[in-house]
């Protein structure tokens, strides 16, 4: 006895939905192709999400590796970046330097509690902060006013990732040229991202570290420390002769 066509069709449709075989002339195979392509897109998107932070970390790491080598061995020749470019770590001296301005040296920031040892560039633009922490242009001379430093918290090295763990009494060190400035944290708070008063200088020697709050970009985490000691380090030439 012949089986009615509508019964055959229902059987084949059920088999298609179960993934056993496509319906001849139907759209089951097309749906499978779409599913496969969608799955491939999800895989590509996942790889991209992983690759972006890795690339950002590599950018910062590459600069920091060379910068710390230059700071640890100041007698070395500056690292060249290209045929017609300036040396990587050569910071231009202002045309009209004033006593109150920040010395034009690459900085070395050390926070032992957070296991942070990082070079600090001059500037807080997107390109500057790709390299690591940066000095705000408003920063004063460390012995006369406020030295302000910004850094990312969740990208490009994430050097300030655990900044919220600093509490009063913790130590922060900043080295500029042959001088090391030792600070003790006295405040840790959150403020609006447009609150520029935190980096203003009041004539009090201090350091200000700023970073974002990952869950709320409208505010900033601020850590302040007061200057407690100035250490004059011997130049490399003197160290070699002693």
Image (cartoon, grey):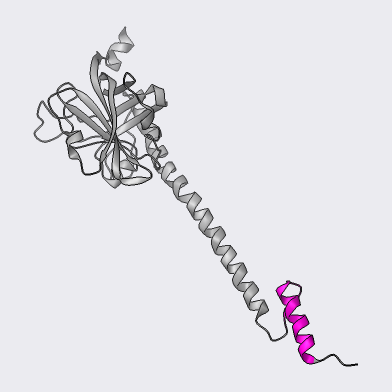
Instruction: Name the outermost residue toward the right.
Output: 1
Q: Is residue 103 visible?
A: no
Figure quadrant of residue 227: top left
Q: Nearer the viewer, residue 57 or 64?
A: 57
Figure quadrant of residue 206: top left
Q: Residue at x 78, y 81 (%)?
A: 11
Q: Residue at x 32, y 46 (%)?
A: 217
* Residue 216 x, y percent position in the rendering: 34, 46
Instruction: Name the outermost residue toward the top.
Output: 242
Location of the N terminus (image quadrant): bottom right
* Residue 161 x, y percent position in the rendering: 40, 35
Q: In the figure, 159 relative to 30: above or below? A: above
Q: In the figure, 8 relative to 85: above or below? A: below
Q: Main secondary structure of the magenta part?
A: helix
Q: Residue at x 31, y 9 (%)?
A: 241
State how many labels appear: 0
Q: Nearer the viewer, residue 79 or 213?
A: 213
Q: Nearer the viewer, residue 73 or 51?
A: 51
Q: Is residue 11 magenta?
A: yes
Figure quadrant of residue 35: bottom right
- Magenta-colored span: 5-23
* Residue 234 x, y percent position in the rendering: 27, 13
* Residue 222 x, y percent position in the rendering: 28, 33
Location of the C terminus (image quadrant): top left
Q: Is residue 44 visible?
A: yes
Q: In the figure, 80 relative to 183: above or below? A: below
Q: In the figure, 193 relative to 141: above or below? A: below
Q: Is residue 58 magenta?
A: no
């Amino acid at each position: 006895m012949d089986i009615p066509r509508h019964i055959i069709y229902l059987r084949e449709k059920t088999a298609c939905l179960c993934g056993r075989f496509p319906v001849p002339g139907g759209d089951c195979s097309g749906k499978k192709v779409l599913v496969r392509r969608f799955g491939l897109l999800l895989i590509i998107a996942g790889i991209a999400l992983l690759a972006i932070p890795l690339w950002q970390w590599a950018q910062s790491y590459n600069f920091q590796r060379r910068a710390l080598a230059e700071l640890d061995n100041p007698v070395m020749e500056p690292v060249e970046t290209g045929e017609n470019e300036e040396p990587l770590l050569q910071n231009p001296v202002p045309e009209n330097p004033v006593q109150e301005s920040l010395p034009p040296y690459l900085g070395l920031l050390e926070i032992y509690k957070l296991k942070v040892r990082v070079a600090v560039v001059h500037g807080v633009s997107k390109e500057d902060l790709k390299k690591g922490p940066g000095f705000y242009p408003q920063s004063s001379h460390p012995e006369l006013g406020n030295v302000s430093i910004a850094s990312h918290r969740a990208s490009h090295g994430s050097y300030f990732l655990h900044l919220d763990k600093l509490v009063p009494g913790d130590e922060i060190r900043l080295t500029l040229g042959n001088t090391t400035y030792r600070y003790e944290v006295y405040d840790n708070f959150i403020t609006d991202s447009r609150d520029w008063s935190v980096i203003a200088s009041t004539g009090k020697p201090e350091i200000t570290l700023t970073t974002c709050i990952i869950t709320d970009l409208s505010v900033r985490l601020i850590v302040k420390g007061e200057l407690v000691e100035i250490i004059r380090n011997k130049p490399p030439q003197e160290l070699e002769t002693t």
